[in-house]
Image (cartoon, rainbow, N blue to C red):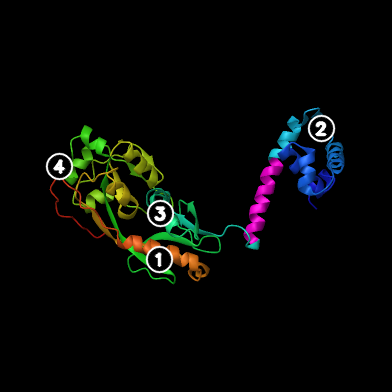
Amino acid sequence: MSKLRGLVPSTHSLFVFEAAARSLSFKRAASELNVTQPSVSHSIKMFEKHCGTALFVRDNRGVQLTEAGRQLYDEVRVSFRRLEQRLEAISGRGTQYITFAASTSLAAHWLAPQLYDFQEEHPEVRIKVVATDRDIDPDHEVDVTVWVRSRDFERANSWFVCDEIIFPVCSPAYLLSHPAPQTVEDLVHHQLIHSSDAYRKRMDWSEWVELAGGDASGIKPNIVFNDSQLTLQAALAGEGIALGWCLTAQHLVKNRLLVRPLPTQIQTERAFFLLASDDASKNKRCKILVDWFLAQSEELRILEPADAAGSRPSLHVVGQI
């Protein structure tokens, strides 16, 4: 049996206390609970007697919470709200969200810049974005997510989004204060921003440089972030050159917040896939989100970077081993 049952006179006393503490008025609490003011006053007195401490200070101006009352109200308020949200969720009476699990970089730089436009077009679809550092299987709690898998990946309720293409990115300010790299070999002499995700396999600088035909032996990671979002943030701050992925860096490059200092890019044998749970795929609102995401991905174009002279050099595409 829960200890709570012995710590309060009754569950009703908690509701009376919450209403009185929130409104700081026994009269308003009585009106809200549809009882008399003396009934509220009596319930509070019994609650204080049971707790062995005063919860309210009463004077001619009304009532105020004591320190003990304030601390108790903080806990009761949060607990009540959590119970409300959970009961609404399991009863189906609360706001129904489509939950989208995504990496922090995808959430910050692909979803966030576009979801408000989506919401204006589809106000009936509410979306909850959950940033996660690992791939999550869509289930009863996660409706939609994005994985990077081998290009021949097949699974029910999954859709190809785009190929995995990786290229260097940096801020315009960084290029203004540093000599622009002319070749892959030149990158070794720049401040390269590194990341090493614990749960997602991502190409690192050494692998990228070698696949691009350069010598990676001179690369020495000084600072390593455990999330690719942090490397993009450091690049935006002008701290150096990071590796950008086509999907997550698309809007940053398009809006010139980041630029591509070299035309070289690596196209791997992997691709981005959108996945939905079995239940979500039958949900009309989820289908709207999936169709929108795929339509946006059809418009995804890898911007060919201009070199220092402003020309548009050819792209260098290599398959990942």
Q: CA distance from mark 2 to mark 4?
A: 74 Å
Dot 3 or dot 2: first in sequence order is 2
Q: Give x and y (percent) for residue 250.
A: 31, 52
The secondary structure making up most of the magenta span is: helix
Q: Quadrant of residue 21?
A: top right
Q: Amino acid at mark 2?
A: Ala
Q: Which residue is mark 3?
A: 117
Dot 4 or dot 3: first in sequence order is 3
Residue at position x 20%, y 58% in the image: 317
Say which of 72 and 223 sits in front. Answer: 72
Q: Which residue is mark 1?
A: 291
Say which element carries label 2. loop
Q: CA distance from mark 2 to mark 1?
A: 58 Å
Say which element carries label 4. loop
Q: Amino acid at mark 1?
A: Asp
Dot 1 or dot 4: first in sequence order is 1
Q: Which residue is mark 2?
A: 54
